[in-house]
């Protein structure tokens, strides 16, 4: 079974992934911040027992991961794949996650809320992620009564999540917008509609997500974010076309140079690796280069593979910065497909 980030999705030239997250609390327990250690332990035991049959409902295999029984490296690797949060892996006291074999689902247990149900889909496919999360939510609700208010909706630890408890997001690859310094203007524009953008210059990956969960239905929240995403996609494509037309030789040279560095370098820092892979993604999406066997035009799996904790897990031993950079270059050379001239 493919991982979600290996799947093909709509608008994959720009949209890396779609995510849906539902925050829920059980009515019989205090919120996590008020749980005693004994109560937190009892909560996890009850959740583990009653959620054990989830795999039979959606034909997925799930792993229960207690945060106090896995290594620090494994914890960080889970955050690098966006399956758990920094809050969960650093939490004092009992906490866990249930992660599906294909990593399209992760359920955070006793993080900031009792349950945070996350579902992922490759490309622009909120509907797929929503159906998966909604189905799991219904199944869990059969075993547990949620904390719910008739007027306010689902009750959560943070007021910003009260209502639907729904956070939806897209992960976008925006090299043209970032390169032309237009992110600040976009952030200001979409903020008026209750949407935020955040990310990192390394790799030009940015996440847009809703801030408001109260006063809108789930469908309205998803439609609002999708509409805004399409506007950003339109701007990114327009800018990509413009900069390619203005400097076709320069852009092509950048893309091919980036491939050459990745294919033959002996040491590679994480930021440089992410930026070079971003150039390759730009070239693949624009048809400037072709890679052998690359049916899906995405290097996002490679971006995940070169993260620090992933490399350390692969090596099976602690790595200092120098050794990690060497392993990163080795990993890229081994996994980057051959160029089709």
Image: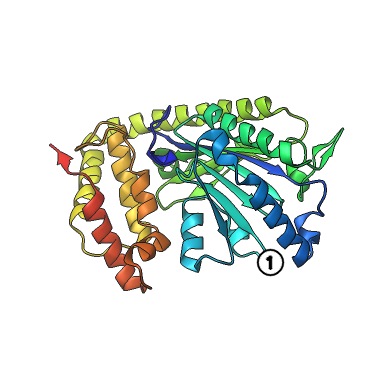
The image quarter in which residue 24 lies: top right
Residue 150, picture quadrant: top right
Position of residue 189 relative to residue 321, above or below, is above
Q: Position of residue 287 (x, y in %)?
A: 25, 31
Give the tally of numbered discs.
1
**Mark 1 secondary-structure assignment:** loop
Decide: few, some or many residues near mark 1? Use Cα within 10 Å; few <14, some 14-19, many ≥20. Answer: some
Residue 281 x %, y %: 32, 40
Taking the spot 57% from the left edge, 25% from the top edge, the residue there is: 227
Residue 185 in view in this figure: no
Q: Is residue 272 visible?
A: yes
Residue at figure coordinates x 54%, y 30% from the top left: 126
Q: Position of residue 136 (x, y in %)?
A: 62, 36
Q: Is residue 321 toward the left or the right of residue 154 in the image?
A: left
- Seen from this angle, which residue lies furthest right? 150
Q: How is the image coloured?
A: rainbow
Compared to residue 157, the image places residue 219 above or below, namely: above
Which of the image's four quarters has the N terminus? Answer: top left
Q: In the picture provided, is 308 more to the left or to the right than 252?
A: right
Rendering quarter of residue 31: bottom right
Q: Residue at x 81, y 43 (%)?
A: 147
Q: Position of residue 94 (x, y in %)?
A: 67, 63
Q: Residue at x 17, y 44 (%)?
A: 338
Question: Depth check: 50 or 227 in front?
Answer: 50
Classify residue 236 as left or right of residue 186.
left
Quadrant occupied by the C terminus = top left
Q: Which residue is mark 1?
A: 93
């Amino acid at each position: 079974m493919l991982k979600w980030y290996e799947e093909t999705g709509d608008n994959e030239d720009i949209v890396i992934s779609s995510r849906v997250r539902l925050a829920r609390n059980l009515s019989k327990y205090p919120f996590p911040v008020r749980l005693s250690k004994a109560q937190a332990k009892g909560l996890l035991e009850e959740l583990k027992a009653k959620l054990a049959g989830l795999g039979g409902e959606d034909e997925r295999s799930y792993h229960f991961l207690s945060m106090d029984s896995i290594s620090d490296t494994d914890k960080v690797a889970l955050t690098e794949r966006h399956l758990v949060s920094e809050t969960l892996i650093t939490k004092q006291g009992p906490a866990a996650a249930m992660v599906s074999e294909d990593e399209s689902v992760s359920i955070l247990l006793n993080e900031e809320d009792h349950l945070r149900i996350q579902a992922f889909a490759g490309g622009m496919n909120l509907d797929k992620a929503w159906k998966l999360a909604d189905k799991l939510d219904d199944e869990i609700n059969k075993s547990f009564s949620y904390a719910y208010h008739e007027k306010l909706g689902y009750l959560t630890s943070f007021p910003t999540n009260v209502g639907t408890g729904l956070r939806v997001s897209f992960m976008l690859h925006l090299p043209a917008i970032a390169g032309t310094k237009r992110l600040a203007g976009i952030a200001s524009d979409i903020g008026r509609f209750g949407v935020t953008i955040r990310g990192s210059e390394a790799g030009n990956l940015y996440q847009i997500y809703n801030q408001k969960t109260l006063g809108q239905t789930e469908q309205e929240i998803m439609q609002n974010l999708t509409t805004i995403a399409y506007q950003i996609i339109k701007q990114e494509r327009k800018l990509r076309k413009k900069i390619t037309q203005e400097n076709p030789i320069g852009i092509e040279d950048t893309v091919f140079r980036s491939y050459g560095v990745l294919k033959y370098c002996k040491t590679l820092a994480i930021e440089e690796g992410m930026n070079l892979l971003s150039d390759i993604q730009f070239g693949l999406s624009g048809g400037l280069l072709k890679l052998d066997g690359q049916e899906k035009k995405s290097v996002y799996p490679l971006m995940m593979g070169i993260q620090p904790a992933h490399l350390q897990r692969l090596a099976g031993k602690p790595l200092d910065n120098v050794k990690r950079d060497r392993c990163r270059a080795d990993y890229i050379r081994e996994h980057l497909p051959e160029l089709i001239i």
